[in-house]
Amino acid sequence: MKQFLENYDLLFAMTILTAVAILIKCICAIVYQILLRDAEQIGSTKNKWMRMMHTKFEACYKLRVPVHNPSCFIKNYMEQYRFMGFSMKTLENTDIFCGLIVAGGTLLGIMCGTYYELPQRWIFIHSMTLAFFLLFLFISEIIFQVRHKRDFLQIRLLNYFENTLQGKLEKQFLHPEENKAYQNSYFDKEEPEDKPEETAGPKEDEEDESIADITIEQEETYASTISPDMQELIDSLLEESKINKELDKKKDKLKAAVTNEKYRLVEEIMKEYL
């Protein structure tokens, strides 16, 4: 044991342990950064863990069993997330475990060194090394911000599941009648705007027929008093007016068709997203 302490083997072991702890913190930071990137697009993500969470959350509403506490649901899934078989909660607390082991091992080594009457230089080196190891572990947490990233990931997931997905699934599976009634009431309010255009067609036809009858009667009445050139001019004017009226009718029908198509597209969009 004395030879183990004199050769600074304890110091070497504590150095390796601290380096491994800092490396694990770096890996945790990378994993959480990838999860944060996937959390920005949960609906189309390829992450199996998030897809499974999304599927289970949606399945609850399909079975008409709403999730009353999405925060607890997300925390439960985050506790279950594992990297290389280890829980992320355990990996991100590696610095705490390492700090306790390094502090305990170094203090025990100093006590043994005092018992074996090792020089004061040896005790001073181990004491300063312990302080540096603990400082490095603290700085690694500040640099990698593992716990901050975990909290931010939880907030981002909660924001999506509680504020976006939950409301959509409740309308789709728990209150489909209310959603359908809302859509029907919306389109019922919009439809009367087209009714005057639709009803305007028959009235215009009746007016056109009455005008045509009047013009025919006038032609028969004044046919004997109008010269052939004048009669030809009148006929051309009447023909031109008929063509203009037909064009106006076609324009009105085209406008009505375009309006109906817009309402149909709006209805499809609302059915898909609401």
Image: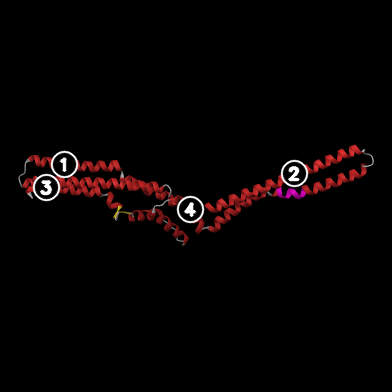
Assess whether mark 4 and mark 2 are in contact (beta carbons under 8 angstroms). Answer: no
Q: Is residue 140 left or right of residue 71?
A: left
Residue shown at the point (39%, 46%) measured from the top left: 37
What's the magenta region?
Answer: 197-203
User: Which residue does the numbered mark 2 point to in the structure image?
Assistant: 247
Q: Which amino acid type is shown beneath numbered disc 3?
A: Gly
- Report the front residue among 51 and 135: 51
- Residue farthest to the bottom? 63
Q: Is residue 158 left or right of residue 234?
A: left
Total count of labels: 4
Label 1, secondary structure: give it.
helix
Assess whether mark 1 and mark 3 are in contact (beta carbons under 8 angstroms). Answer: no
Q: Earlier in the sequence, mark 2 or mark 3?
A: 3
Assess whether mark 1 and mark 2 are in contact (beta carbons under 8 angstroms). Answer: no
Tell me residue 196's x, y (percent).
71, 48
Label ID, residue 109: 3
Label 2, secondary structure: give it.
helix
Question: Can residue 125 be seen by looking at this rendering?
Answer: yes
Q: Nearer the viewer, mark 2 or mark 4?
A: 2
Instruction: Tell me how far mark 4 sits from mark 3, CA to CA.
Output: 60 Å
Type of secondary structure dominating the magenta stretch: helix
Q: Nearer the viewer, mark 2 or mark 1?
A: 2
Label 3, secondary structure: give it.
helix
Q: Which amino acid type is shown beneath numbered disc 2?
A: Leu
State the image quarter where residue 252 is shown: top right
Assess whether mark 3 and mark 4 are in contact (beta carbons under 8 angstroms). Answer: no
Q: Which amino acid type is shown beneath numbered disc 4?
A: Gly
| Vertical arrangement, residue 230 with respect to residue 23, above or below | above
Label 1: few (<14), some (14–19) or many (≥20) C-alpha neighbours in 10 Å: some
Q: Nearer the viewer, mark 2 or mark 3?
A: 2
User: Which residue does the numbered mark 1 point to in the structure image?
Assistant: 129
